[in-house]
Amino acid sequence: MNAPAAAPRPRLLWANVLMFALTFAAAVVVVPWYGFAVGYSGAAWAWFAILLYANGLAITGGYHRLWSHRTYDAHWSVRLVYMILGAMALQNSILVWAAGHRDHHKYTDDNDRDPYSAGRGLWFSHIGWMLRRYPSGEPNFDNVRDLQKDPLVAFQHRYYYVLAIGLNVLVPLALGWLHGDLWGVFLLAGVLRLVVSHHFTFLINSLAHFTGRQPYGDGHSARDNGWLAFLTYGEGYHNFHHQFAHDFRNGIRWWHWDPSKWIICALSWVGLTSRLKRTPAVAIHRARLAMQFRRVEAGLARRSLSLPHVDVAELRERVRREYALFTATLAEWSRLTDAWYARTRATVVARWEKASFHAETRALLYALRMQHRRLELLGAQLA
Ligand SMILES: [Zn+2]
Ligand SMILES: [Zn+2]
């Protein structure tokens, strides 16, 4: 019997292949050559940095957190800026990008349906998925009907190629002409900026699904990675993002490097963004502690025979007590909040009652935070 013939590989998307290959070749050959032969002006470096960040933030703050996930609302002027700078980032139109990204979340790691599934390898999830017409990469526009109503999104989709090519050629050339350094600015703020901007963003689909920690959930390959956040405008906290995709933040602590979050937040102070969605703190603590319990349990099962210096039975008893405390704290949280909402629906509450409710919920969150620390210490004994 003949073996079934292997399915033919999807055809190459030559426009993408040439665009990525030629810009990459220019960035690694022509850009350094010009630097050695002629040198670059301060203006060229400054515009490289400004446009790199402007493009990156338009993708993360606009394409990703605003349009793909609707984590907040933005004034039309903010959407206009995102739309223009996002087109300049040359990552397809908002509509195509969001359609693919919504599938990425809906079917994460499903090799047949996630457009940039990590299960198909680092190269595929980084860039390979854009080089051939893979069925998984076909945009499903049913996914983005809500976005089609946004006139700015529809306009950008219609004139995407004119906008994208025009902005990438004309803006760097115009800036170069203004500074009297036409080719220097074009090479750094045009070519190098585009290549670096591409690969920094692509790292979110590739490395952020391969290396890092999974503090909030392991039902998917997404990982938290502090150093990656520096390169990806704050999107390195990808495990949190996949777990709580409707949160406008990716890095939730104030010290987490997340410039996209800071900009969205700062714009809300002047009324340009609104309805910023945040995951309730208790849900974040619950997810994190549930993961810790699973890890500690797995550690106990794995190391029970190989740790003669540790009293495993005593550790097991401590974990049991911690777990009972965890469920009791969550039950108390539910009781407290249910009673509060029933009361606020029925009557107008006094200020002192509000203050007392907030104090009680703060105390419960503090208890969960302390429990997280204790479990960290406990887990360290099993490492
Ligand atoms: Zn992802
Ligand atoms: Zn996302």
Image (spheres, grey):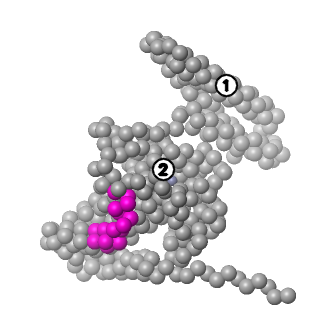
* Left or right of 250 on screen, residue 173: left
145 or 289, which lies in front? 145
- Secondary structure predominantly adopted by residues drawn in magenta: helix
Q: Nearer the viewer, mark 2 or mark 1?
A: 2
The verdict on residue 74 being magenta is no
Does the numbered disc 2 mark a residue whose Cβ is under 8 Å from ligand 2? yes
Mark 2 is on which residue type?
Answer: His
Could you say which disc has been placed on residue 331 in the image? 1
What's the residue at 63%, 54% (across, down)? 220
What's the residue at 47%, 13% (across, down)? 349
* Left or right of 158 on screen, residue 131: right
Few, some or many residues within 10 Å of mark 1 (<14, 14–19, 20+): few
**Would you identify the image quadrant in which residue 63 lies?**
bottom left
Q: Earlier in the sequence, mark 2 or mark 1?
A: 2
Residue 91, given in percent of the width and then of the height, sits at: 42, 66
Mark 2 and 1 residues: CB-CB less than 8 Å, in contact? no
* Left or right of 308 on screen, residue 96: left
Mark 1 is on which residue type?
Answer: Ala
From what the image shows, is residue 62 above or below residue 5? above
The verdict on residue 155 being magenta is yes
> Which residue of the protein is positioned furthest toward the right in this rendering?
1
Residue 83, given in percent of the width and then of the height, sits at: 34, 58
Could you say which disc has been placed on residue 69 in the image? 2
Q: CA distance from mark 2 to mark 1?
A: 31 Å
Residue 339, given in percent of the width and then of the height, sits at: 59, 18
Residue 21, given in percent of the width and then of the height, sits at: 43, 79
| Magenta span of residues | 152-167
What's the residue at 53%, 57% (across, down)? 143
**Would you identify the image quadrant in which residue 172 lies?**
bottom left
From what the image shows, is residue 295 above or below residue 113? above
Q: Where the N terminus falls, by quadrant?
A: bottom right
